[in-house]
Image: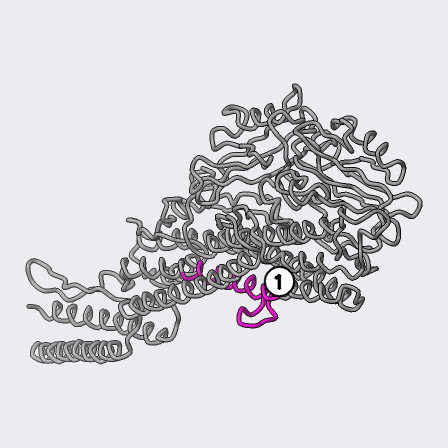
Amino acid sequence: MSLNSIMNIATSGMQTAQSQLRVTADNIANVDTPGYVRKVADQSAAVTNGYGAGVDVTRVRLATDRFLQAAALSAGSDAARQGVRSELYDQIQSQFGDPSSDANFFAQVDKLFASYATLAESPTSSAARQDTIYKTQSMFNQAAGIAAQIQSARQEADGRLQSAVETINPLLEQIDKLNKTIASGSVVNQDVTGAQNAQLGLINELSKYMDVKVEPRANGGVTLRTNAGTTLVGEGHATISYQSAGTVDATTAFSDIMITEPSGTRWPLLDGVSSGQIRGLVEMRDVDAPAAAARLGELTAKMADELNRAHNANSSVPAPTTLAGRNTGQSLENALNGFSGATTITAVDAAGVVQASAQIVFSGATMTINGVAADPSTFLGVLNAQMGGAVTASFADGRLQLDGAGGNGVAIADDATTPGSKGGRGFSHWFGLNDLVTMTTPTFYETGLTLTSQHGFDAGESLTFRFAGESGARQRDITVSVPAGTGTMGELLGALNDPITGVGRYGAFSLDAAGRLAFKAYDPAATTMSIVKDATTQTPSGLSMSELFGLGAAGATRAGAYSVRSDIQQDPGKLALAQLNLAAAAGTPALSKSDGRGGLALGDVGKRNVAFASAGGNAGGTKTLSAYAADFAGDIGGKASAAKTRSETAAALSTEAESRRTSAQGVNMDEELVNMTTFQQAYNASARLIQASKDMYDVLIGILQ
């Protein structure tokens, strides 16, 4: 071996040792840098003509473990998803109050019923009346506040979605730029580990927002996809677009989050994202929060309806001079059709003595009033004639109104054995003539309409439905127009269910015996329906189709729609606590101020079995208001606890996965110090070899001299 060969071997050894020391120094300098992956310098022996010619550093790479990296990214993404769901659901749950405290919303429900029962023992007490009215209004105010906070949580989730999109796009752009830097550096065998570490940090940040799958590229850099295969970074980078809705309420229709892949293909992003903050925010906005709002709406609606049921069956003393009904959303003919049984309308003086009365006996589409035959078209005329001017009945804009004359009040009672009834509601209750609780939207959706009933919507008016898949991404928007024809519910149902121009490809609408219009998807687990736009207006009510029938998320709007009747709030004496005694002898009072039976009926509202509709994932069914409220309380608390548990579990798994990745890829100071000592000794050994070569050169030169 020549001296030149020895010198070359020593020089290559020194250069390799220097490279290794630089790598080791970089690793030590970044020992506390989060996400830093340690560098490794691969070296190999140089061979010339079968003889060793030194050592070279072939490349500097990162000590990346693809499998541990994938596990850590997946676990981190799921932790972000569950974390944001738990955070926002905790906001919702906290609005209902501490479940262990008797001051929470659900405890107030039972306290209210107890207050009415106590009031029945002292019906003449103005203070007790005022206190009960205050508690009733307070409960509905609290329900409205909770409903508003639920929508605020949805609005926050929607705003955070836009912020996430605005963060993701620069991340994708930077990752793509680093791809180019890494690829160009790899071609000329440069050390690109700095760019790779920076890129890994960006990928870690991206995985908090959406699930990410990393695939190394042959020419350096990475290809990023979602777990569903949507390309995020490849030959270029994807662009995500979204515009938040701004102010959010229960019926807000959100736009799709769209992704344009590097190839130019445009997709709904949710089809390809199964984890990360984006998925968690969408689940909270579109699933968790609406479910809570729907159940709250159902509870408050039934509570208002049952309080009104009891209040309509009773009367204040003296009786009110005017009974103004609610907007039924129907013509008088439709509203009267379907009643059965008997009810009596009376005019009473200030002392509660009956001055005139009219017994109405219903029989299908016809009726008798004090024995005089009538039908829906002649109802008002015959009733007014039978009341002899003591009470005047009128109907306008979907509302029935009864006005007493000459200082007379108006009181109504259904027959004790065969009460007047339609859809399970008495005559006064159906028309809302003596409601305790008023509303800005329909309380119940059992309209009493049949397939032959006139629906009241104008031909050409339209309703736009949105169908979304299991991921929450839009499948299709379908606009259905009210058909021309005779205007019956049967025709409207046919147009809605048409497989070409209607929703018949996704499910079907049906009208039940109580007149409730409902949609059922063929595959409820994979298809959800919402209302994007409702441009219908019913005559005479002025209600839209979704308001009248509770379509889409209309039912969830009810929680904020109720208040105690304003005149009762101003005058507690108008609270109906007495029952009209139809058997009272002529000239004797049929109403008494000391009668508290109406208060007992109001107090028993919480114990009465009620048919609840399915809402917010709850199947509904028949149960008492108190039982439903207790179930709802357990459901809210259970879901909040489950969300917290999922978040903690996902966070623990993420911590474990990250710990394992760090253990394999991170900097170990002991190892690096050993490496530093080893490479310093290697450097010194090469230096001594150079010194030995120099000495031999000196000897050789001395010999030649």
| Residue positioned 77% across, 38% down in the render | 399
- Which image quarter is the C terminus in? bottom left
Q: Tell me if residue 537 can be seen.
A: no
- Residue 690 counted in the magenta span: no
| Residue positioned 64% across, 37% down in the render | 447
Badge 1 marks a residue whose secondary structure is helix
Dominant secondary structure, magenta: helix
Q: Which residues are magenta?
A: 79-108
The residue carrying mark 1 is 109
> Percent from the top left, x then y, of residue 338?
65, 32
Question: With 401 as the anchor, is 342 left or right in this view?
Answer: left
Q: Tell me if residue 427 can be seen.
A: yes
- Which image quarter is the N terminus in? bottom left
In which quadrant of the rendered view does residue 114 lie?
bottom right
In which quadrant of the rendered view does residue 457 lie?
top right
Q: How is the image coloured?
A: one colour
Q: Amino acid at mark 1?
A: Val
